[in-house]
Amino acid sequence: MAPKVLVSDKLSETAVQIFRDRGIDVDFQPDLGKDKEKLLSVIDQYDGLAIRSATKATEKLINAASKLKVIGRAGIGVDNVDIPVASKKGIIVMNTPFGNSITTAEHAISLMMAVARQIPEANSSTHAGKWEKSRFMGVELTAKTLGVIGAGNIGSIVCDRAHGLKMKVIAYDPFLSEDRASKMGVRKVELDELLEKSDFITFHVPLTDKTKNILSKENIAKLKPGVRIVNCARGGLVDEDALADALKDGRVAGAAFDVFAVEPATDSPLFNLPNVVVTPHLGAATTEAQENVALQVAEQMSDYLLTGAVSNALNMPSVTAEEAAVMGPWVKLSEHLGAFIGQMTDEPVKEIQITYNGTVSRMNLEALNCAGIAGIMKAANPDVNMVSAPVIAKERGIKISTTTQDKSGVFDGYIKIKAITDKRERSIAGTVFSDGKPRFIQIKGINIDAEIGANMVYTTNNDVPGIIGTLGQTMGENSVNIANFTLGRAAAGQDAIALLYVDEAVPQAVLNKLSETGLFQQVKALQFDVA
């Protein structure tokens, strides 16, 4: 019997025809996603669900989908899909992360031109029968400095288009290598220099803890007078209240925003300011982009349902069904190892070296590589998955090398990941025990045996008395329960580490108390996805 797919949002007829041509039984009901109760009553009939943003794949809907194998999102955003619940149900969630890159980049350039020449205001004035030619004095883009925050897929396209406009381009991106920057024709700078030297600034980063309010009140004070700000990436990257004040007092000459901290944006401090251009999140709103993502998701879902091939999955690597049962714990281990390095590393990674020893060296190393690379990069970009991570790493000039070894040491197999930056090398190794649980077995060359939990605390120190007591007492006094406690040292009196598995995230104030004792060189809270 042919697999059956429900298309519950508006996808193009061409995309629907792809399902038919591939032998899929497709049910095209483009308005069904808006009717939650009716959708809930029929979802158990389908093997696949193709959606845009109107359909909400909630826990309730997913639990009712007894046959569902794959959810395909035509677009990049998956806020409308409960991925953890889908994962537990064994449902693959796919998206199309690169289908609207050109469209979004072009929108950023369009907004930059619009704010530079005050086009929306001039348009309204002229429609009103006024002829205020002297009122709308603009600026040229030629020879101006464009500061690009985030030089990934979309950011790199913006850089390319800006070169065509004869702009000088500088970029801030912790993951951008000097070699990649050179090939892009941009000069890599730190954030402060970008703020101080840019005539225009455009954002192309995801919203994370590190990027939230990256243009804060403090950073706005560092801006070059007369700068113009463009945001087509994510709301929340800019302190909108502080920016509004800077626009009113003239420090910032103009702004153009397609995204807002709260959406739908029915009110914003940026609204109704004469030097601000606003659009309702139109970054991906072109006929071409919508067609591209629809065609891609139809092909991806058909491939999976007919052949088992996985592309752009957010919750699993590309592995065969036979490999999945054996590799699952090793994939999770590789991701944990990468996540440790990603959370511990602030500077750009130049090279990632992955060593596979023993039994694991004979597995699907491509999938394991993807998991490790994704783990590293998720600290800066949570949207990265095991499919997109290698692509992004390649774009940013990160060298990936893999080494396989015959069994050595006491473990049947282990994985070791080393990340190299301009300042340091950071390495960690782990294995999977017979119970299927991943373990950390070495950090900084120091042997350990650490259970991996959702919330952990990592410390480094000189090997001196009092470390265990200080850690235990500080955690106890602040009601933090320690589930597991691992220590390791290079040798007596030399470098030592501690890894605590705790029941819940440790407040920064508690970490500060540990740092203030003077015993620790480093104190870091870590999170791992152990679901």
Image (cartoon, helix red, strand yellow):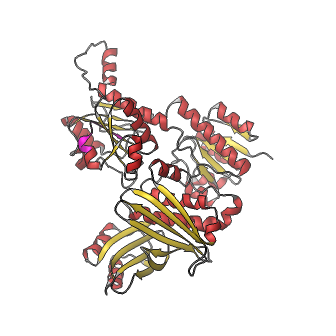
Q: Is residue 47 above or below residue 333?
A: above
| The residue positioned farthest toward the left in the image shown | 249
Toward the viewer: 341 or 110? 341
- Percent across and percent down for residue 523 are 34, 71
Is 299 one of the magenta-colored residues? no
- Is residue 37 toward the left or the right of residue 119 in the image? right
Is 197 one of the magenta-colored residues? yes
- Is residue 430 toward the left or the right of residue 18 in the image? left
Q: So how many labels did they put on this image?
A: 0
Q: At 64% across and 59% down in the image, what residue appears?
A: 89
| The residue positioned farthest toward the right in the image shown | 1
Quadrant that contains the C terminus: bottom right
Q: Is residue 528 visible?
A: no
- Percent across and percent down for residue 273 are 27, 31
Q: At 35% across and 68% down in the image, what residue appears?
A: 507
- Percent across and percent down for residue 245 are 22, 40
Q: At 58% across and 39% down in the image, what residue appears?
A: 34
- Percent across and percent down for residue 398 are 45, 54
Toward the viewer: 155 or 129? 155
Toward the viewer: 248 or 338? 338
Q: Which quarter of the figure has residue 226?
A: top left
Give the residues in magenta.
195-202
Q: Is residue 431 visible?
A: yes
